[in-house]
Amino acid sequence: MSKEIRIGTRSSQLALWQANNVKQLLEKEGHVTRIVTIDGHGDQDLTQPLHRLGVVGLFTKNLDDAMLRGEIDIAVHSLKDVPTELHPNIAQVAVLERGQYHDVLVYKEGEPSFLNELNSSGIIATGSLRRKAQWLARYPNHEVVSLRGNVNTRLRKLDENNWEGAVFAQAGLSRINLLPEKHIILDWMVSSPAQGAIMITALKSDGATKSICNSLNHKPTEICVKVERDFMKTLEGGCTAPIGAKATITGTDLHFIGGIYSLDGKENVLVERNASMEDYPKLGKQFATIVLNKGGKKLMDDILKEIENE
């Protein structure tokens, strides 16, 4: 009988869906598995905006700690929530094939005509600085309010408040069958680095578990999210600032669009390029350097000062 693989995950409905997806894939290959739920600081403090909590690995640290203590063998994460620098004893061992990566607007009443009028007013909710900045860039007369919690909580808050709508990741709502009929895919919004991708980690020293999980890795997704996360890491080393990045592969070509946005949406520095997929290990840094040299460094410095002074 093979060794039981203990799968660490947060306890939200979406996190459990992702962990059970991994569980099913492993069991299909004949492995014995068990889900272990562990929540983090980001799940417990639902009042402060994410960028004010000041904790690196807000949704991942407790799972890392449990792995280092030997309580779990692997952890399953939404890759967009994972710091660009992993703990030195922990490795990324697989990235599953990416799901939907777009952001969506979930709205409440009738047709969202307020989106079609240039000078319209409206109240939109999101807990993401990236979404807020891009929304204000497109709809400068709207008000954007903070929204925290798991997807179930955020949908409930949308229903309870006088907001026109709220912005969510399409993948999160779709995976747990909570995407309402009243939604619009925001194909103009540049998504978060690694949005829609699920990542598995294990101890670097656990060769057997690493080998087992490597079989679940989807190479094209791994390539794309590496470019996106390297882009973010080069710009500011974390996931606080309003940074969007999206890489896609067609044949042997990789298309990339990404950039940084001021908090009020009035400024941005973007880059869009095509490159050879074979060059992926260096592309994220190259694209970020273009942004920094086009004025992104000053914009990033201004953003970080503004966040610190809030």
Image (cartoon, grey):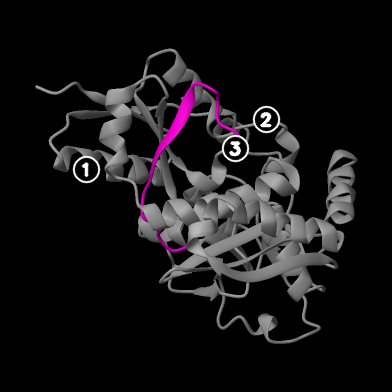
First in residue order: circle 3 vs circle 2: 2
Q: Is residue 307 left or right of residue 115?
A: right
Q: Position of residue 205 (x, y in %)?
A: 39, 19
Using the image as rendered, state which of residue 134 and residue 258 is in the foreground: 258
Q: Is residue 202 above or below residue 166?
A: above
Residue annotated with mark 1: 24
Residue under the image location 47 percent in, 26 percent down? 90
Q: Are marks 3 and 1 in contact (CB under 8 Å)?
A: no
**Numbered label attached to residue 83:** 3
Residue at label 2? Answer: 55
The number of discs equals 3
Q: Amino acid at mark 3?
A: Pro
Choose the circle earlier in sequence order: 3 or 1: 1
Residue 195 makes an appearance in the image: no
Q: Are marks 3 and 2 in contact (CB under 8 Å)?
A: no
Mark 3 or mark 2, which is nearer to you?
Answer: 3
Q: Secondary structure at mark 2?
A: loop
Depth order, front residue of 84/261: 84
> Real-space Cα distance between discs 2 and 1?
32 Å
Range covered by the magenta-colored residues: 83-104
Res 138 visible: yes
Q: Quadrant of the C terminus?
A: top right
In percent of the image, x 22 and y 38: which residue is there? 26
Q: Residue at x 17, y 29 (%)?
A: 32
Q: Position of residue 244 (x, y in %)?
A: 65, 59
Q: Quadrant of residue 88?
A: top right
Q: Is residue 272 left or right of residue 301?
A: left
